[in-house]
Image (cartoon, helix red, strand yellow):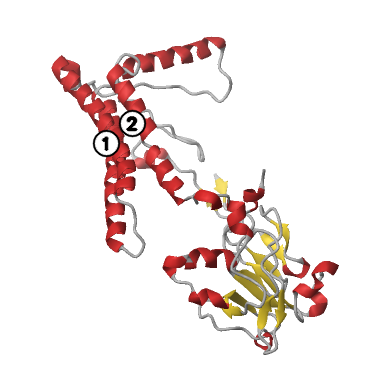
Amino acid sequence: MAQDGNSGTELAAADSSDHGHGTEHAVGTAVVATDAVPNPGFPPHRARVTDLDPKKEKRAERTVYTLFYLSAAGSIWAIAAYMMFPITPEDLDSVRANNLFIGIGLALALLALGIGAVHWGKALMHDREGIDMRHPTRGSDETRERAVEIFAEANEESGFGRRSLIRNSLIGALVAFPLPAVVLFRGLAPEGEDANPVTLLQNTMWKKGDRLARDPSGVPIKAADVTIGSVFHVIPEELANVGHSEGYLEEKAKAIVLLMRLKPEDLVEDEDKKDWSYDGIVAYSKVCTHVGCPVALYEQQTHHLLCPCHQSQFDVTNHCAVIFGPAARPLPQLPIAVDDEGYLVAQSDFLEPVGPSFWERH
């Protein structure tokens, strides 16, 4: 008999005979069923048509390497389409044609490669089920030798070594497949005398006397408009006169600036840079020195700038020095002053290249 610790009443042990069973079990013991479902094993192997008919096996092989050849042709067509259908500025039809024909080539390359690989596996490779027992520790020498044998068996069962047409067409398709990406991305790079990124980022639109204007309206900013704790996204006033076909976005991407005002006593400024700010107002490049993301998050209380891409943090009070993250150098500072009408103006361009630091590595 058992006793309830709360009420003191005695509890009778459960009797298995009450449930119609002929044996009794102690209270709290587990009962292991004797009629567990047996392992059904693998189902009977079903031979494929390619296993039974050599002609269909040969047809499947031809299908596979033909698909791989089509994949290579699609990659080559994408490269040719990039050259045959160039994008003309202000011409949307050229953009549509360029995207359409390059997309057709890339789609054919990827689709044919995928279908060919799947058809190879389903129609020609060995398809018998097997069990591979895995162990968490290093195997014995015999096991390691067996692993080498398994690779040899896999090569034999897949036919990779002996089906030369499939193997060679697959290699050709894989070699051709990344080429369109190489050509397309190379087309984005600058060419000619200004191909050096350091040279391109060395100078921006800012020059002496340019007024600081709000982005994107282009309205000039007066020093009196910038209150303590505020932040402005700033572009050169002259940028409004640049058309999109004349490189508006490229110039803006280099010249974009963040403008903030702190208490003058909070700024820790080098002696040679004390005249780069005006009454606690400072301006820094908005382009992160890690990989060029926009540094657009300003913590008013800590005076930290945060890049949302890779979490680099810069201390505005100390010339935007890096205090956390992968950025390699501080944000370039734009020297500013105030003109006779009270508008904020640039004293000069940035005195160092804006943007990612890796462009400057030699």
Q: Is residue 294 visible?
A: yes
The location of residue 260, given as percent across then percent down, is 68, 76
- View extreme (front): residue: 193
Element type at mark 1 = helix
Q: Is residue 30 left or right of residue 175?
A: right
Element type at mark 2 = helix
Q: Which image quadrant is residue 237 in?
A: bottom right
Which circle's residue, 2 or 1, is located before the other in the chain? 1
Q: Which image quadrant is residue 353 in?
A: bottom right
Q: Is residue 8 left or right of residue 120?
A: right
Compare residues 94 and 167 and report the one nearer the observer: 94
The location of residue 180, given as percent across then percent down, is 37, 41
- Residue with the mark numbered 1: 112
Looking at the rendered structure, the kind of residue marked 2 is Ala
- Residue with the mark numbered 2: 173
Q: Are marks 2 and 1 in contact (CB under 8 Å)?
A: yes
Q: Is residue 8 visible?
A: no
Looking at the rendered structure, the kind of residue marked 1 is Ala
Q: Residue at 33% of width from left, 31% of height from top?
A: 173
Q: Residue at 70% of width from left, 57% of height from top?
A: 324
**Number of the label disc, if any, that sits on residue 175:** none
Instruction: Classify the position of the N terminus by image quarter.
Output: top right
Foreground mark, 2 or 1?
A: 2
